[in-house]
Image (tube, rainbow, N blue to C red):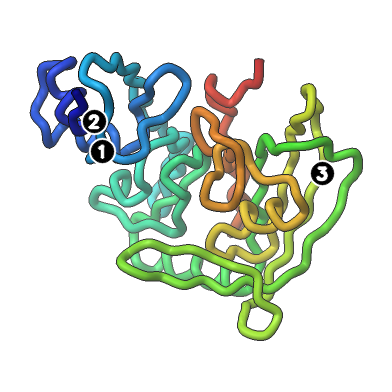
Amino acid sequence: MREKAYKLLAQQLDISNKKAKELIDRGLVYVGNRKVMIARGELPVGTKFNVKKLQKPQVIYEDENIVAINKPPFVVSDELAGEYELIHRLDKETSGVLLLAKNKEFKQKAIEEFRAQRVYKEYVAWVDGIVAQSYEVDYPILTIKKGGVAKSRLSKSKGKPAHTYIEPLEIHGKKTKVKAIIKTGRTHQIRLHLARTEHPILGDRLYGGREWRRLMLHAKKIELLGYSFEAPEPEDFAIE
């Protein structure tokens, strides 16, 4: 016999169907090492689930203008805004520095810095394959949003300029930890540019990456308007 995944999870954890569906949609539910992707997908009755604990966000810095948060994976950026306004966003499974503005004047200044490409943005990622030397990707990106979901593709004719600098940091087997510095900030830019060079990020199934415990991308450092913030890599970012 088979049953919908969220119903089986609800039974196992003795929680509501709604809560079970939320856990699956957030990306926290696994069967063995395989993430459950579709809450309404059917699985054998008796399936045993592993549910990862959602980490708590940590405040890195706060003053009268800005709040810098170390966003954990599986948390949507908008969930952390509260009474303040997001200056930028990170993908749900991406961890690292997330900035909030405490007033509209500062937010506008920050947005102008992003538009003028005067913001330093440094990420780290684990990718497939061996990256032996540094390289740059300069390929325009077109983003299409449909039904609240965004997906990007490379397009010389229709895309907006996008520039990414890649530097290898550590090699583990046939996987490489890389630094990625972006001058522009197109949707999914690092993910798409790495996939373009045949080094998709681990866990990035949208752009051809192999299945992993999560998207292995971390926003390590950001600098703007005289501020500099850095977030340590979370425990789940290590490769064993």
Q: Quadrant of the N terminus?
A: top left
Residue 118: where, in percent of width, then height?
66, 65
Q: Nearer the viewer, residue 107 or 121?
A: 121
Q: Quadrant of the C terminus?
A: top right
The local secondary structure at tag 2 comes to helix
Residue under pointer 2: 5
Inter-mark Cα distance, 1 to 2: 5 Å
Q: Residue 108 got which mark?
A: none
Q: Is residue 121 left or right of residue 149?
A: right
User: Quick check: marks 1 and 2 in contact, CB under 8 Å?
Assistant: yes
For residue 29, which quarter of the picture? top left
Residue under pointer 3: 167
For residue 175, which quarter of the picture? top right
Residue 69: where, in percent of width, then height?
44, 39
Q: Is residue 177 above or below residue 79?
A: above
Q: Is residue 18 above or below residue 135?
A: above
Q: Is residue 24 left or right of residue 57?
A: left
For residue 37, which quarter of the picture? top left
Residue at image location 78% in from the left, 28% down from the top? 174
Residue under pointer 1: 39
The local secondary structure at tag 1 comes to loop
Q: Amino acid at mark 1?
A: Ala
Q: Residues within 10 Å of mark 2 (few under 14, many from 20)?
A: many
Q: Amino acid at mark 3?
A: Glu
Residue at image location 29% in from the left, 14% down from the top? 48
Inter-mark Cα distance, 2 to 3: 40 Å
